[in-house]
Image (spheres, rainbow, N blue to C red):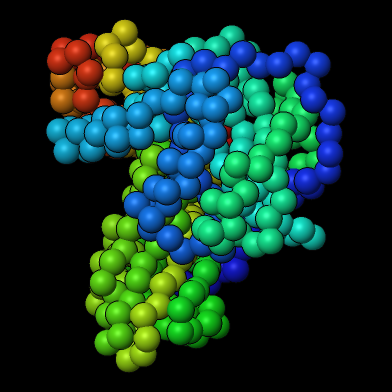
Amino acid sequence: MTILLHFCVLSLAAVPQPAPAAAYTPGPIRIDPPYLEGSLLFPEELRPIMASVARFLTEQGYSVVDLDAQDAIIRSALQSCPTPAVPGLLLAHRFPDAAVAGLRAQCRSDCVLTLTTHSAPASELPGPTTLWQAPLPDSSMSSVLSAIPQLSLRTVTRDGEVTGGSLDGGFPAAVGRGVQLHSLLASGQWTTVEMIGALDRMRFDACWADGSRDSWGNPLHFSVNGRGEVDRCTASRSHHLPEPEEACACAVLSDADFGAGGPRRGSLALYSHQPPAASVDGRLIAASMGPLKTQSAGLDLGGSGVGNHELSACFARASGADEAEILLRYRVDEQGIPTGWEAVWPGWVDDAARACLDVLLRTARFSCSLDGIGGEVRTTIQIRVR
């Protein structure tokens, strides 16, 4: 297992900016959970901040989607479907005409609170629409709550670039199969170094998984009691699905002994990797499914569950693999379970590759239909060879 300290830096300078030339017309809006740099708060502990943002946006003329209604929609989907929709995609589907607001508290050379609204999913002009900022003494909850009423309008460009903003980040190339830990945080009666020492003894490599249904990262937050036992472990962002390996990581943490001491909290994010699939003639094969398309509402809100590496490994079994784009059609029932599939394979996809694909593609699982009927789901398999 590799423990990697990695930080994604977003710097937003709170410098005065002229008001936008044309004011954005407020309308319906829903609020994503906030991000407080260095915070180890659980989702429900951030609720007062979301409520304060709701009050601020209401004062600006927006019609805020009820926070409890958002949670109820997500909770129902998670409980009623064997492969639930990605929460953020589900909310975008249910509220296609509602803009989205996100709050971030970050400290670099100075501390800044930034509230950004993004256009509604149904908008023909995707991207940020308005941006407010306020200075902060620090990124604590109390400071953020005090600063929200002080937010003032800044300039935001249509191409998505926030004035004064820059983004730094990216993962290093991974070698070998396994799990890297990054973005580690600790609070309470221990340090990050002490937490790393404890985590380094744990077998997170067993948690490797192939692929994710949600493109957003979702760090784990966990709390440790005075006996050194993990008494809570959960994904930090309630509007995104945990990574496939995060339930496994929580199981690993549940068996850990962090030693007696005061209450502590920790946070970590998992990055799984696997070497590229190599064909029998030594070339590297990369295969992936493109966006899902369907006429049946809901079936395309949770991915297919087919991992890219497993898909690449099937095509790597063919001796003459070549680049291609292949249309794949699934027939899917109301629970998101395929009842059949069809594709026209290139001539180089031989019997060995077809046998592998026949087993793998049957394992696909889609999110449940929202109207109670199944339908067809189409996607394109893209194959790249080097």
Instruction: In the rendered view, tell whether residue 24 sits above or below residue 356.
Output: above
Q: What residue sits 39% from the left and 19% below the top?
A: 95
Of the pair 127 and 199, the residue shown nearer to us? 127
Counting from the top left corner in percent of width and height, residue 96 is at 43, 16
Of the pair 312 and 133, the residue shown nearer to us? 133
Q: Is residue 261 left or right of residue 120?
A: left
Counting from the top left corner in percent of width and height, residue 353 is at 35, 34
Counting from the top left corner in percent of width and height, residue 4 is at 57, 68
- State the count of labels: 0
Q: What residue sits 42% from the left and 83% below the top?
A: 198
- When asked about the image quadrant of residue 259, the answer is bottom left
Q: Residue furthest bottom?
A: 260
Q: What residue sits 27% from the left and 11% below the top?
A: 296
Q: Is residue 236 left or right of residue 360?
A: right
Q: Is residue 320 visible?
A: no
Q: Is residue 223 visible?
A: yes
Pick the quarter of the image with the C terminus: top right
Instruction: In the rendered view, tell whether residue 39 sits above or below residue 353.
Output: below
Q: What residue sits 69% from the left and 61% below the top?
A: 137
Instruction: In the rendered view, tell whether residue 134 sits above or below residue 292.
Output: below
Of the pair 233 and 173, the residue shown nearer to us? 233
- When asked about the image quadrant of residue 348, the answer is top left
Counting from the top left corner in percent of width and height, residue 88 is at 40, 32
